[in-house]
Amino acid sequence: MNARKRMLRWASGIMLFLGTGHLSLLAFFDWEDVTGWVDRGMWAAVPLVLADGRAGQTVDSLQNKVAFWAGPGSFAVPLILLGCLTWHLAGRGVAVPAGIGWGLAAWCVLGGVLLVPSPFFAGAISGALIIVAARKKDRSGAAREQEMGLA
């Protein structure tokens, strides 16, 4: 396995771990809210209007919204999808553009600064790995031998 592929696989593994870990923690800590969405129907996660017609929001409705935006509405699902795409592209030998790495790193550093303590900073490692992998030249063994004067 070449260095670029190894770095991209590590980057995608970190992204998959962070995304699935985030959703798993939601399921563990807010299980009642998640199962409530299933019981109450498709629009129960973040209702557009209050069910009883009152003007104010209750603590339960706010907790329900927080659970949604901390789980399926959060960064976790796109991060899992980006991790899967990166894994797939690494397997095909295609480099992920460095701009994706820069964007991911900047987003994770900003999120880590705003939400301390947070594992957001681990996502910056994925971004850095994508940047380095994009800059690495994909050289075959024959090309390396030729450069070293062994051929």
Image (cartoon, rainbow, N blue to C red):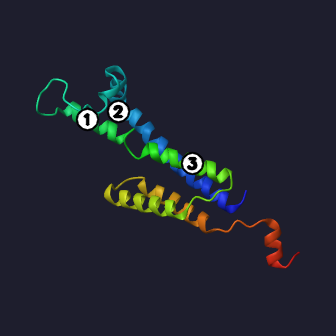
The image position of residue 94, as x and y in percent, is 65, 57
Q: Which residue is mark 3?
A: 85
Taking 82 as reference, is 135 above or below it? Answer: below
Element class at badge 3: helix
Q: Which residue is mark 2?
A: 30
Residue name at image x 25 percent, y 35 percent: 63
Residue name at image x 83 percent, y 73 percent: 145
Q: CA distance from mark 1 to mark 3?
A: 32 Å
Q: Quick one: label 2, few (<14), some, or many (20+) residues within 10 Å?
A: some
Residue name at image x 33 percent, y 41 percent: 69
Taking 143 as reference, is 62 above or below it? Answer: above
Closer to the chain start, of discs 2 and 1, is 2
Q: CA distance from mark 3 to mark 2?
A: 29 Å
Residue name at image x 83 percent, y 75 percent: 146
Quarter occupied by the N terminus:
bottom right
Taking 136 as reference, is 33 above or below it? Answer: above
Q: Which residue is mark 1?
A: 63
Closer to the chain start, of discs 1 and 3, is 1
Residue 105 appears in the figure: yes
Closer to the chain start, of discs 3 and 2, is 2
Q: Nearer the viewer, residue 52 or 119?
A: 52
**Tag 2 near tag 1, CB within 8 Å:** yes
User: Position of 81 compared to 44: left or right?
Assistant: right
Residue 72 position by quadrant: top left
Q: CA distance from mark 2 to mark 1?
A: 9 Å
Residue at the right extreme, as displayed = 151
